[in-house]
């Protein structure tokens, strides 16, 4: 069941749950996530960053589309963090059902203009658009998704103006998260009061970036306060590759079918926890 972001999140917003957006950059990770969401009857957003797309190529997206069209659960294919209009158009032409225009680093009016331009190109193709207002922090300056050294929290009044002027379908808000995994000594803290104020002024579903490695209690509460999509990348990749390092201690292994299954299962444990935490598990029947 292939859907765009607007339609898949409308149900989540109405029923007060969130959908994880898992970054998948390999066929093994993709298969593992799809097997899990079908086993648990859960909707999912499969997210690919432009750098990941350059690595996998557009044929990877074609494979995802084929599986999604046959799947009994709702699947959205989303282009993560992209400020390059040409790459966004390339993604639309190659089967993405949702794209993100990342203009958070731009002045307010330029961010609106960029998002509106993408909306005007995407909506006629039934492709939804996400934008970001404020800045997500970073735990590593080399992090693929980027992020700012200093978090600029989303202003609720600006959020309302931005959504109305740009026409975006969903908005990523800055309430204190960072991309990547938090190092020892760094304590993440979400500003849930800001989230409440934004939710009161904005009608579109809200998105939380940097959803890996945050305390479950805060993340769970953010879902009850209006977050409908949470990006998960680092957590599942750490689980996958830590297990791979363990498996490869057996130096006689060389076949992917000997190495990857254990890695996929380790990743699925983490992903299942996120589905449960976000109250996504078992929600696919709401779309039928």
Image: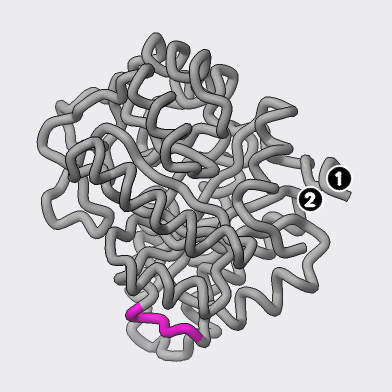
Residue tagged 2: 41
Q: Residue at x 64, y 36 (%)?
A: 276
Q: Camera-side residue: 91 or 167?
A: 167
Residue 107 in the image: x percent, y percent?
18, 39
**Label 1 to label 2, Cα distance in Å?**
8 Å
10, above or below 35, in the image: above
133 displayed left or right of 148:
right
Q: Camera-side residue: 245 or 273?
A: 273
Indicate the secondary structure of the residue bearing disc 2: loop
Rendering quarter of residue 33: bottom right
Q: Is residue 129 visible?
A: yes
Mark 1 Cα-neighbour bin, 10 Å: few <14, some 14–19, many ≥20: few
Q: Camera-side residue: 274 or 82?
A: 82
Residue 214 in the image: x percent, y percent?
37, 31
Q: Residue at x 41, y 50 (%)?
A: 116
Q: Residue at x 67, y 59 (%)?
A: 75
Q: Classify the position of the N terminus by image quarter.
A: bottom right
| Tally of numbered tags | 2
263 displayed left or right of 84:
right
Residue 212's tag is none
Of badges 1 and 2, the one in the foreground is 1
- The segment highlighted magenta reads 54-58
Determine the main secondary structure of the stretch shown in magenta: helix
* Contact (Cβ within 8 Å) of mark 1 with mark 2: yes
Q: Is residue 265 visible?
A: no
Residue tagged 1: 285
201, above or below 100, in the image: above
153 displayed left or right of 49:
left
Residue 19 located within the stretch drawn in magenta: no
Indicate the secondary structure of the residue bearing disc 1: helix
Mark 2 Cα-neighbour bin, 10 Å: few <14, some 14–19, many ≥20: some
Residue 7 in the image: x percent, y percent?
69, 47
């Amino acid at each position: 069941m292939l859907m765009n972001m607007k339609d898949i999140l409308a149900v989540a917003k109405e029923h007060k749950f969130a959908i994880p957006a898992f970054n998948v950059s390999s066929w093994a990770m993709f298969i593992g996530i799809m097997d899990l969401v079908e086993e648990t009857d859960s909707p999912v957003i499969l997210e690919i960053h432009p750098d990941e797309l350059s690595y996998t190529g557009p044929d990877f997206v074609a494979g995802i589309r084929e599986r999604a069209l046959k799947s009994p659960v709702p699947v959205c294919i989303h282009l993560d963090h992209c400020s390059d209009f040409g790459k966004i158009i390339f993604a639309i032409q190659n089967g993405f059902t949702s794209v993100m225009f990342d203009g958070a680093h731009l002045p307010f009016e330029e961010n609106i203009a960029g998002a509106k331009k993408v909306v005007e190109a995407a909506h006629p193709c039934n492709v939804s658009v996400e934008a970001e207002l404020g800045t997500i922090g970073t735990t590593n300056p080399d992090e693929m998704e980027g992020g700012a050294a200093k978090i600029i929290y989303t202003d609720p009044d600006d959020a309302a103006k931005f959504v109305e002027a740009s026409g975006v379908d969903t908005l990523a808000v800055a309430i204190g998260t960072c991309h990547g995994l938090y190092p020892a000594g760094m304590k993440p803290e979400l500003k849930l009061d800001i989230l409440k104020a934004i939710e009161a002024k904005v009608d579109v579903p809200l998105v939380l970036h940097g959803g890996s490695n945050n305390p479950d209690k805060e993340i769970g509460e953010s879902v009850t306060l209006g977050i409908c999509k949470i990006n998960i990348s680092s957590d599942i990749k750490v689980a996958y590759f830590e297990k791979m390092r363990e498996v490869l201690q057996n130096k006689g292994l060389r076949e992917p079918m000997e190495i990857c299954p254990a890695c996929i299962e380790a990743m699925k444990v983490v992903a299942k926890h996120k589905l449960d935490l976000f109250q996504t598990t078992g929600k696919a029947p709401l779309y039928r």
